[in-house]
Amino acid sequence: MKTLVTTAFIMLLTIATAHAGLKVVGRGDAMRLDPSAFPADMKASYEIMRVRCIKCHTMERTIIALTSGIAPISGQPFDRNATRAYGIKMMRKPDSNMNKQEVKTVVDLLNYLLVEAGK
Ligand code: HEC
């Protein structure tokens, strides 16, 4: 019994820390990432995401997808195989005000962030 409890505890701990890799600042609508530890090119990409991807919804939606691995509205997986499709979906929305190059930059950033989130 004791072993079982210990095992359960360790599993919970692992789940809680599995996605501890991203530095999230603020809560709710004010939620954002702290890019200070990003490499220079990813810092530049973050600036694009910070401006382009908060036009219709806040950064919280993207951060939840990154840290949980689940797209919060559809409940679909949000992993490396999915980032490009989400980027294109967002670009195609009316008045998205994004071009292909910006979406590609953000998709590369999302893939980088998914790896970081998994650390
Ligand atoms: C023109 C408005 C608009 C812009 C700009 C926009 N989004 Fe969205 N986003 C939406 C809407 C509307 C939804 C609701 C669900 C859907 O249609 O996928 C959404 C949903 C999402 C979801 C959740 C998807 C799901 O299936 O749960 C994520 C993640 C996301 N957006 C990330 C981004 C990122 C990253 C960017 C920048 C590249 C971005 N959004 C830019 C409108 C926008």
Image (tube, rainbow, N blue to C red):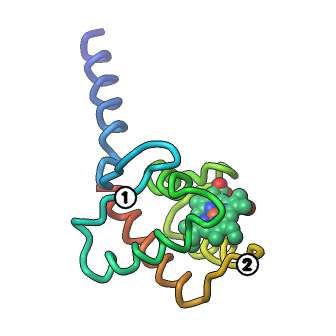
Q: Residue at x 61, y 67 (%)?
A: 55
- Please, what is the three-letter code of the amino acid marked with disc 2? Arg
Q: Position of residue 85 (x, y in %)?
A: 64, 73
Q: Position of residue 35 (x, y in %)?
A: 30, 65
Residue 114 horizontal side relative to residue 41, left or right: right
In the image, farthest residue toward the top: 1
Q: Which mark is residue 92?
A: 2
Report whether residue 86 is seen: no
As measured in the structure, the alpha-carbon distance from the residue carrying label 1 to the one carrying label 2 is: 25 Å
Q: Residue at x 36, y 38 (%)?
A: 15
Seen from the viewer's position, the closer of residues 60 and 85 is 60
Q: Which mark is residue 33?
A: 1
Split into 4 quadrants, where in the image is the C terminus? bottom left
Q: Quadrant of ligand 1?
A: bottom right
Mark 1: which secondary structure?
A: strand
Q: Position of residue 106 (x, y in %)?
A: 49, 77
Q: Position of residue 41 (x, y in %)?
A: 31, 83
Pointer 1 and pointer 2: residues touching (CB < 8 Å)?
no
Instruction: Count every numbered label the image shows and give the total.
Output: 2
**In this rendering, is residue 64 above or below 55?**
above
Seen from the viewer's position, the closer of residues 7 and 69 is 69
Seen from the viewer's position, the closer of residues 79 and 43 is 43
Dot 2 alpha-carbon crowd within 10 angstroms: few under 14, some 14 to 19, many 20 or more? few
Q: Splitting the image into 4 quarters, where does residue 5 fall?
A: top left
Seen from the viewer's position, the closer of residues 109 and 9 is 109
Split into 4 quadrants, where in the image is the N terminus? top left
State which tag comes first along the sequence, 1 or 2: 1
Q: Which mark is residue 52?
A: none
Report whether residue 57 is seen: yes
Q: Residue at x 52, y 48 (%)?
A: 29
**In this rendering, is residue 80 above or below 75?**
below
Badge 1 residue CB within 8 Å of ligand 1:
no
